[in-house]
Image: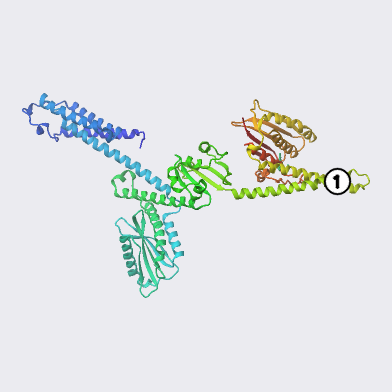
Amino acid sequence: MNQIKAPTSYVSASVIGIGAGLAVYAAQTMGILPNLATFIPATSPLDLKTLDDSIIAACLVVFALALSLTLNRFGFRRCWRWMLVSIVTVCGTGTVGFLVLNVDLLPIPLLLSGGLSLLFAQINRLWSLDRQLARALFHSSAGTNDAIGANTRLLSGLKLLNTVLPLSEAVVFRYDEIDSLQPVARFKGAARNAQDPRRNSVWREGIDLCQRAAASRQLVSQTTPGQNSSTVAVPLLHESETAGVLLIRLTSEFSADDAPLLAAVGSQFARNLERESFSQNQAGSQSLSYFSQAGSKKKIDALNVLKAVTVEQRCEASTLTHIDDGVAIAYLDGTLALVNKTLLGFAGLAPERVSTMDVFDLLHKFRTDVFDEPTIAVRRVLQTGDEYQGELNFEKKSQILNLRISLLRDRQPASINEPIGIALHVKDVTATKEYEKLKSDMISLMSHELRTPLTSINGFAELLTADETIPPQAREFVSIIANESQRMSRMINTFLSVTQLQRKDKQEVLKIPLRLDEVVRETITSLQPVAKKKRIRLVEQPAHRIPPVAADKSLITQAVKNLVNNAIKYSPERTTVTVSTALEAEAVRVSVEDRGFGIPAESKERVWDKFYRVVREGQEKDEESTGLGLSFVREVVEQHGGQVDLDSEEGRGSKFSFTLPRL
Ligand code: ADP
């Protein structure tokens, strides 16, 4: 534990040092300590000169203080050599002083004060470490002890047993401090217990059975002769320790087939017992726990709770191994914590290879043209906390996989949201994609086929409208046919252009350096007449020095046109529509803002979908409206690696915008 020592630890080390020095000085002045002459016979012990009292006190205090502070600062392992040198020096100079100079240089009191000071300073250090350990243990165990109480979990386990076995009674016993069995949870089944009249002897027999089970660490069963019932004692084992015993009485004979079930449920009971014991055992003051048996017991309980939680977390993690999607979890040092079978299959790896791989090695197996730098994707996720999502097309294997890399965060209240790992989620979308393609192919084919008859309908209808011989009412009908067929072919054309675009790969769109402010200027000029008709002020708000983007000019121009057209179409007269360009960190943003009808909150996500139109009260569905304009915009923008955005408030206006990556 590499932590800066608290100033209080120096204060207590100083108090110990000074205390030890003064205590030995007191003993010295009282004459309790043995004289040096006792150990070293000298010629004239009476002539032995002694030091002044104040010097003796100062020497003892300084020596003890120096040792206790050194021990506190460096620890015994790092400073024992210096201690040895100082002790040897004290003994050496003491002996020389005594034999040669005939002066008592206090070797015995010095050694005693130093020894006492070291002993108490070391005890103090261990005590303080123990307090830290206890605090950490209790804190983590209390944190893992979930909202459901330990006792409730025991009862819930007994209920579960009742649903799978014909129980008449079930009791969970725990070992108390004096190693006798104490019942902690009890469940009575619906079936009447035939043995009720001889309650006490039955209870004693049960306890005997439990003790046999605990001693042998094996399940023990006993069938009552003549009655169709049996009693079973199951030792509750947790990490090779017997935490208690489960005693069940069945209304039928015990079948050996149920032994594995009872062993499995028993180990869950054992974990719950550890919890129960931890929550029951309220040790006194933590600071005295070092010297108390209850304190130590509580620490063992806390450790057992932690062990139980680890087992339960293994159970949570193992659910991931059974799902059809590929899942892997890595710690933040890149080590793989879990890779499920499906993901191994996608990566084409044998399970034994995983132990030698890290998350980057694993991601390397999913490299494609689109996902060519796994390290960059992981770095982005770690930097921003945002998920990475990509569609990986493996043409050789005819497989399309959807890959998601996300940051896992701690859900504990104390460390809320702290990143703790990286999750990879891989889903096979080949079948879905094939189905979607088939669907859109069919629709495109039909739309193509519709175009030919529509052209004739429209052509002949227009011819007929010019025919003066036809009665006026019939001519009106014919002109409706002409208009509607024109509208229908416009719809089909837009639809086909959206579907065509959807099928293209990002690389297929022809991209050249393009200045978006110029596109905006041209669009505004071309749409001014439409705006003027509705007395709408159409203004441009350009930013200075906009860098170019790589884009297909005609597609982007059409997208901007759709947005501006919508802004004019869905705004009342005498309002303003503002088109602006702005530079963002890595992208250029084009925004079209109006003071029109706005979009209701529930439609915000859906306006970008094909054929979606907002229904407004008192507004007839516009006959020019197809619900395809915005889906075209989104398709174009995403093909260029950008993003669309909408900010709107119903009745106050909307701001549609998109970004394209800057060059
Ligand atoms: P279309 O305009 O052809 O119906 P779009 O896909 O362009 O199709 O728009 C979808 C729906 O979104 C429209 O029906 C319209 O109600 C709504 N909408 C689009 N732009 C705006 C806007 N600027 N203000 C209010 N509503 C809008």
Residue that appears at 40% across and 45% down: 139
The percent position of residue 573, horizontal first and vertical second, equals: 77, 36
Q: Residue 465 occupies which quadrant of the picture?
A: top right
Image quadrant in which the N terminus is located: top left
Q: Residues within 10 Å of mark 1 (few under 14, many from 20)?
A: some
At 42% from the left and 48% from the top, the residue drawn is: 144
Q: Nearer the viewer, residue 626 or 444?
A: 444
Name the residue furthest bottom: 226
Q: Residue at x 53, y 52 (%)?
A: 324
Kindly identify the amino acid type of the residue bearing the numbered disc 1: Phe
Residue 477 position, x and y percent, is 86, 48
Q: Position of residue 39 (x, y in %)?
A: 10, 33
- 170 or 623: nearer the viewer: 623
Q: Residue furthest top?
A: 101
Image height of 293 relative to 252, above or below: above
Q: Where residue 42 sits: x, y (%)?
A: 7, 29
Q: In the displayed structure, does residue 384 sit left or right of residue 625?
A: left
Whether residue 383 sits left or right of residue 307 in the image: it is: right
Q: Is residue 306 visible?
A: yes
Colouring rule applied to residues: rainbow
Name the residue nearer the viewer: 499 or 245: 499
**Mark 1, secondary structure of its residue:** helix
Residue most extreme to the front:
396
Nearest to the observer: residue 661 or residue 174 = 661
Q: Quadrant of ligand 1?
A: top right
Q: Label 1: which residue?
A: 460
511 relative to 175 in the view: left or right: right
Q: Is residue 225 above or below residue 3?
A: below
